Image (cartoon, rainbow, N blue to C red):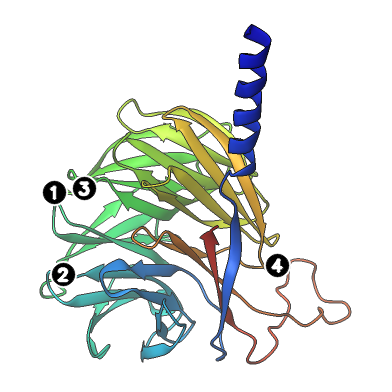
Amino acid sequence: MYRAMLALSLLAALRLAGQAPAYRVTHTYPLGGDGSWDYLVSDPPRHRIFIGRHDRVMVVDETNGSLLGEVPGIHGAHGTAIVERTGHGFATSGDDSAVVMFDLTSFKPLSRIHAAEDADAIIYDAASNHVFTFNGDAHSSTVIDPANGALLANIDLGGKPEYGASAGDGRVYANLTDNGEVVEIDAKALRVIRRWPTAPCRNPVAMAIDVAHQRLFSGCRSGVMAVSDYRAGKVVATIPIGAGVDGVGFDPATGDAFAANADGTLTVIHQDGPDRYHVLDTVKTMPGSRNMGLDPTSHAVFLAGAKFEPLPAGAPSRQRPPMVPGSFVVLVVERR
């Protein structure tokens, strides 16, 4: 009897394992257009994606890949922050140390706000009703009033920030890639109140957050994702990912975290518990597809990609190869 029950249990486990969800590329949206790209930012209520494309921000319908419009007048486009309560979007213009405020319906630029050198990532914190930029070379965060675009402060972060996240409780977090640290910002007092190391992770860049379990996910160029308990201020887990990460995400409904990697992979990591994780899947994408956006309502992951020409003879090994004209696409990855 015991052996029969054990056999049934093993069979059930094998069946469950066979039904484990797998992720795959389900759609490829050809968008074309010139220029490099950076962050993909999802707008779940309207099912749109905002994509920084060097001299503009492309606005794409995530359900069919159609181009809805563009925000012009950007010089070195990186990130976008969406503020529904004011009807405004904010796009970093890194080459001229600025932020462009624009209308979320017409995409018309409304004002240009001076930020700081290398204005890069940008997020909105609803608890304080402030927009925060992360300025790499300036080692700072610029704080903006989303209603009128007024500059409120420049916060010294003590290192080179990359991406950040809002906890929704008046705290904002950012990775410092040169120092290998996470900094915690009081979003109302506008000052850094705490920091902790991400070791053994080095060069943390991308960031996502799990508010329910109070965990931060830092994608690190040293080939791991570092998970921090942001109440305790310490790293509690590291998980291997692909090479050249630049975008991460976390879906609270599935408990899956994602790392988009330049080596042409998307690492999918499942949360078994707040401090326990395992690699669930590795999805083949496109070489260079290291930026991603996640829609937590549809659970789809969006990645940017393109085809590239070979490097010219004698070019430095670190030089980026030229993009094949018109080859820019958005990949949609879904769980099946």
Q: Is residue 211 left or right of residue 260?
A: left
Mark pair 1, 4: CA separation = 41 Å
Figure quadrant of residue 41: bottom left
Residue under circle 3? 168
Q: Earlier in the sequence, mark 4 or mark 3?
A: 3
The answer to whether residue 292 is seen in the rendering is yes
What residue type is disc 2 on? Pro
Q: Earlier in the sequence, mark 1 or mark 4?
A: 1
Residue under circle 1? 188
Mark pair 3, 2: CA separation = 16 Å
Mark pair 1, 2: CA separation = 14 Å
Q: Earlier in the sequence, mark 3 or mark 2?
A: 2
Which of the two residues, 116 or 27, is positioned nearer the viewer here? 27
**Dot in front, 4 or 2:** 4
Q: Count neighbours of disc 4 (C-alpha within 10 A) and say few if under 14, some if 14 to 19, many if 20 or more.
A: some
Q: Is residue 95 left or right of residue 87?
A: right
Residue under circle 4? 287
Q: Earlier in the sequence, mark 4 or mark 2?
A: 2
Which of the two residues, 18 or 109, is positioned nearer the viewer here? 18
Mark pair 3, 1: CA separation = 12 Å
